Image (cartoon, coloured by chain):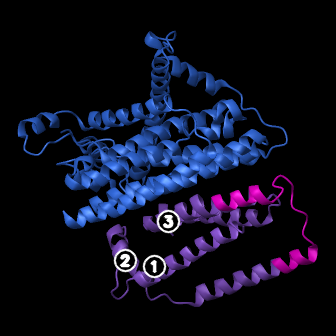
Chain colours: A purple, B blue
Amino acid sequence: MEITASQIIFYILSAIIVGCSIMSVVSRKILRAATYLLFVLIATAGFYVLLNYHFLAAIQISVYVGGILVLFVFSIFLTSQVGEKMPQVKLSRRIAGLIVSLGGAALTLFVLLTQNYPYAAKVSESEIDMYAIGQSLMGTERFQYLLPFEAISVLLLACIITGILVARKK
Amino acid sequence: MFDFKVVTSWIDDLLRVQAGIPEFWTLAIEFVLVGVAILAAYAVLALVLIYVERKVCAFFQCRIGPNRVGKWGWLQTVADMIKILLKEIIHINKSDKFLFLVAPFFVIMGSILAFAAIPFGKGLHAIDFNIGIFYLLAVSSLGIIGILLAGWSSNNKYTLIGAMRSGAQLVSYELSAALALLTVVALSGSMQLSVIVEKQATVWNVFHGFAAIPACIAFVIYLIAGHAETNRGPFDLPEAESELTAGYHTEYSGITFGFYYLAEYMNMFIVAAIATTVFLGGWMPLHIPGWEAFNHVMDYIPSVVWFFGKAAMCVFFALWVRWTFPRLRIDQLLKFEWKILMPISLVNLLLMAFCIILF
């Protein structure tokens, strides 16, 4: 079988994701766990670039790396004793966690492998135009998403107002 | 005007046709060449900028500045670079060594990734994403996490305070910077940097009829917010030397400190370069509608000279501001962003929308 360059990149990225995911769960220092999670998120952005979907890659970087992970690190700084190792988890719990995660992986693999994908052949080879994405986000026609977009913005506004209310109890 | 595509397609042709190298290896060789060129340009520009900063700062303070190494001291930064490369990286006792060593790489990677996507001249553009501006905003947010990790893993209270301040500052000022850039995206109708530059062929965005008013406001907002994002004073309180020794990079030495130093200067250049590309017409020469002879003469100046000339003006402006204003307090800094800059940029975006619809 001929191995192409994109396959090599795919395997490298997958190895990074699998390795760092396991490290992020196993690590007992909470800030290190956050850093491993960061590597996983960046490698996922790499997949999107590999698929020529640059918009989603940039979203992934700016939302997860620039937003959510910064928030994680901030809250870790503010709440916990960062430097100390977390206590060892009990053996019974570790075994239970292992069984649940293996079961989840088995279920996901089963669904992935038995499903057939009618749209798989339609994945576009070229880069998706930013203009088309903007039109479908803001349009009201069929397969356009203005209503969900607005619903999410109302939800986020409610979150912001609640946040302010919680922060200013006085 | 000279098109750099001639050079790049000549190299491509040389590898592909003349030497007969297969597709895969041609691409691999070209990637390496582009990477080396970008890294070399990055390092050389940083050295030049550090020299310029020291010289300009000296003139503002009525000093002479570096003047011993080479004529007018122009070799000073090269000597500094050699010194910093030879220095030992000192490990901090009882600190998280892995995070301590990984943090500078985030900062420098974010900066290099943004640098690589800037159009420096006609045809001199390494990668032209469809999402251009959005890509620049996304990769520049990589630096925040590097600064936060650096501050914590140094195991020092000054660095931690510096990192927290820096995080709050970068996250807040990113909003204004993004909104200011969005104003121009609305005007150009595209996020692709090459398209934004092409659209300014007849007239730059800051002189663009009625749309010039919101464009100029956005330009000023972007310069302020971008200046704050580079952690340079009057917004330099993450590394305020009189209170926090050096902020988040206090404990770094050798090349790991060098990374922060390079990234700081290059971020200043990147902000100037983005401002140039988006507001001042990028590498496009100055054209005045109707003045045919004048426009023709301007076309003879190479595009790279135009680009670096405009960027140098923005950089000089940043230096001027840095050495003129006193440092802000953290509450003043956040109040300035959330209560003044953000509302203005939101209203400005609306104003731009009106300008586009009406005129």
* Residue B80, position as x, y percentages in the image: 57, 21
Give me the residue at 58% from left, 35% from top.
B327
Does residue B20 appear in the picture of this structure? no
Residue A102 position (above or below residue B19): below
Amino acid of disc 3: Ile
Mark linked to residue A149:
1
Amino acid of disc 2: Met
Range of the magenta residues? A70-97
Q: Tags 2 and 1 in contact by the CB under 8 Å rule?
A: yes
Residue of label 2: A138
Does residue B7 appear in the picture of this structure? yes
Q: Earlier in the sequence, mark 2 or mark 1?
A: 2
For the residues carrying marks 3 and 1, which lies nearer the camera in this image?
A: 1
Crowding around mark 1 (Cα neighbors within 10 Å: few <14, some 14 to 19, many 20+) is few
Which chain is indicated by disc 2? A
* Residue B123, position as x, y percentages in the image: 27, 46
Residue of label 3: A59
Are the residues under marks 2 and 1 on the same chain? yes
Which chain is indicated by disc 3? A
Q: Secondary structure at mark 1?
A: helix
Are the residues under marks 3 and 1 on the same chain? yes
Amino acid of disc 1: Phe
* Residue B267, position as x, y percentages in the image: 49, 41
Q: Tags 3 and 2 in contact by the CB under 8 Å rule?
A: no
